[in-house]
Every structure is written in C-alpha cells, then in structure tokens.
Amino acid sequence: MIGKGKTSMSKPILIAILTALFSPALLAQHMTVDQLRDLLAAQKAAHKSDGEIAGKVAPVELTEQLTPPTLDKMEADLQLGPKTTEALALQADVSGFLDPPPAELTVRDPPDAAARDQIMRKAIEFAAITMHLMPDFLATRATRSFDDQPLLISLGGWFPAQRDLHLAGTFTQQITYRDGHEVSDQGPPGEVSAPKPQASPDGLTTTGEFGPILATVITDALKGQMTFSHWEQTSAGVTAVFHFQIPQDASHYPVNFCWIEGPRLNSYRHINDMADAQLNCYKGTPAYHGSISIDPATGTVLRIAIESDVPPKDRLARADLFVEFGTVEIGGRLYTCPVRSVAISLVRFPATEVSPARTMLCLNDATFSNYHRFGASVRVLPAH
C-alpha cells in the first residue's frame, strides 16, 4: 500500500535517485558471448539460485549476436532454470541485430562480383515471384510482449518494483494471406505500426512479413548501398550475409508508431495509470540499415534485420525488427514463410518537474504457426 503522508525528501535528492533508477544504461555490462557463458558457468558453480542468475544476465549488453544454436547449447550444457532461460532468450532477441562471434562464422573466400550479382538476382526473384506464387492460407501469430516500464513508483519512498525487461502480456492473432498479400486490419501491407488498443501488444508491431517488408528492403537496397559481409553456418546450410545502408531519400520503410504519454507522477499514482494520458505518434520513412541472409544456391531469403535511423531529436529513438524464414507445409506442399519475428521500440520521455528523463524499451517476440490452406467449398444443389 502506498502511504499518503507527505515526504520529507528534498526534490533534488529525489530526482537524483529516480535518475539512477531510470538509467539501466548505467547498470549495463558489455560482454561477448563467451564472457556471458563464463558468467553463467561461474554462477552455476557457486550454486546460485535461478532468480539470482537471471538477475546477473538481465543487465548484460552483448557486443555479439547470441545465435539460436549457441543459445540451445548453453541451456543444454548448463541446465539452466526457467527464469535464466527467459533472460537468455531476451538477450538473444536484443542482440539479434549484431553479427555472430567471429568463431561462429564460416571461413570461406568471399564471392567475386559476378557471384554476388547472381546471389542478389536470385534473391530479387525470390522476393518478387516466389512469395507471390504462394496459395491463400491462414496462420497464427502468437506474440509475447516485454517492456522495461517500472511497475510502480511514487514520491513517498516507493521505487520501481522491476526495471529490467519483463513479460507484459501475450497475444494471438490470425493472419490471412490472400491473392499474394497479407490481409490485416492494422494498416496497409508492409507497414510497421502501433497496434490497436486491447487487440495487440504495446510497442512496435508489424505486418508485411509475408512479402512486402522483404520486397521493400531489396528494392531500396538496389538504390542504396549493399555489401557482402560474411558467410554464416545455419540449420539450412551456409548462407551469404549482406549488409545494407538505405538513406532517407531512398527509403520506403514505413514506420507509423504511437505511444501513450502517462500522467505526471505523484505520491498516489501508479506509473501506468492512464488517466489524463496523451497519445503521441511518429509517422515517416526513416533511413535504415541492417542485414539480409540469403541461400546462395536458390536465392531464398532466410533472415532479414532492419534497424531504423530515426533522427536523434525524435521521441521515437528505435524502431527495429528482424524476421526469420523457414520451410512450412501448406496444403501438402512446402513453402518458405516467416516462422518468427522480433520487433523492438524505444521511446524517450523528457524530464518533468517531478521525474527525470527516461526511456521505455518494448520487445515483441512473435512466432508464426498453424499454417493451413485457405479455401472455400461450393456445393451445387439440384433445382426443385
């Protein structure tokens, strides 16, 4: 229960304390994947509890991508508990925009100019043709939403109950793909947008994983800068990873994002009390950069990562996503479809007279499953 008595704490001291509490960057520990593994091993050897180990993992900021194979091996080798497993999964999501550790890259000569052009031509064909030859189908998008919004704060001595990423909710939505396009009530195909209230998670959500996002990136990359980065070993074999940089004047990556501005904090309110809340929005086509992983033999795109370059002055500081593709069966045939996506947003909140400047990070981890062909049957009845 929050006390209603007056506090004797001076405002400057209170603001300083709140600033420290709202600044997770001050607590972040930069680590490589190997250093994170060593940390986990040391904690296990010291017989720390699952919660204590998860608490050590949460503030880590990785400098390399924690890849799915490495994540699986860590969990299997160290026999981690559920809290630590979830903390590691979040680390894998957040680090998903980085390159893997050098030791995990395939040592192989880079493709020459002719080979690079051939790989890109095949990828263009995959995006422009293959994705549009898919049948009409239904699928399920299941999203687990996380954020680092403090659960509780007041000026009477109560401070954030939790400031690391924590589960904020789970959401399920049926996706309809018809006539070569994803049918959604959240906006035009390919648009990255904020969800409708109470229908989808807070933070950045996406549509267009079934073609438009991929086509947008490849089309923009032809006008921007695309360079070969490295070969990477995946479950599908060796893939060619390209980095791209798209300037704002060539960008067709739409971001339409809205967030809730909470009320001023006082001694009696929860921070997530939406009374008198104000809606703020960002809409634009910012510059962006990222990576695309391509099967060099077929041109099949297996992964794409996008990091927006929104201007530093904007309240929306981050609007990024990556999509992983895999083989699924629809109507007895195999197709390449999205199997997972992660969308990350970061919003800046300016300082007020009672609270310091802060940010709020949201992460939506979505999986796509239950693919089945969409069709209608027609029955002809005899005339009476």
Image (tube, rainbow, N blue to C red):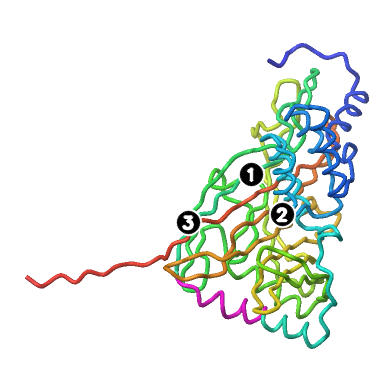
Position of residue 154 in the picture relative to residue 206 (left or right): right
Q: Position of residue 8 (x, y in %)?
A: 87, 13
Q: Residue at x 68, y 33 (%)?
A: 272
Q: Position of residue 174 (x, y in %)?
A: 48, 55
Q: Nearer the viewer, mark 2 or mark 3?
A: 2
Q: Position of residue 148 (x, y in %)?
A: 74, 38
Instruction: Name the kind of residue labelled 3 in the image.
Output: Asn
Q: Residue at x 69, y 47 (%)?
A: 363
Assign the C terminus to one quadrant of the image. bottom left
Residue numbers of the magenta segment: 123-135
Q: Which residue is mark 3?
A: 370
Instruction: Name the kind of residue labelled 2 in the image.
Output: Pro
Assign the N terminus to one quadrant of the image. top right
Counting other residues with Cα less than 10 Å from the Cα at mark 1, is it few (<14), some (14-19), or many (20 or more)?
A: many
Instruction: Name the kind of residue labelled 1 in the image.
Output: Ser
Secondary structure, mark 1, is: strand
Q: Which mark is residue 69?
A: 2
Identify whether 27 is placed above or below 199: above
Q: Main secondary structure of the magenta part?
A: helix
> Quick one: 15 or 290, which is closer to the camera?
290
Position of residue 219 in the picture relative to residue 357 (left or right): left
Q: Which residue is mark 1?
A: 145
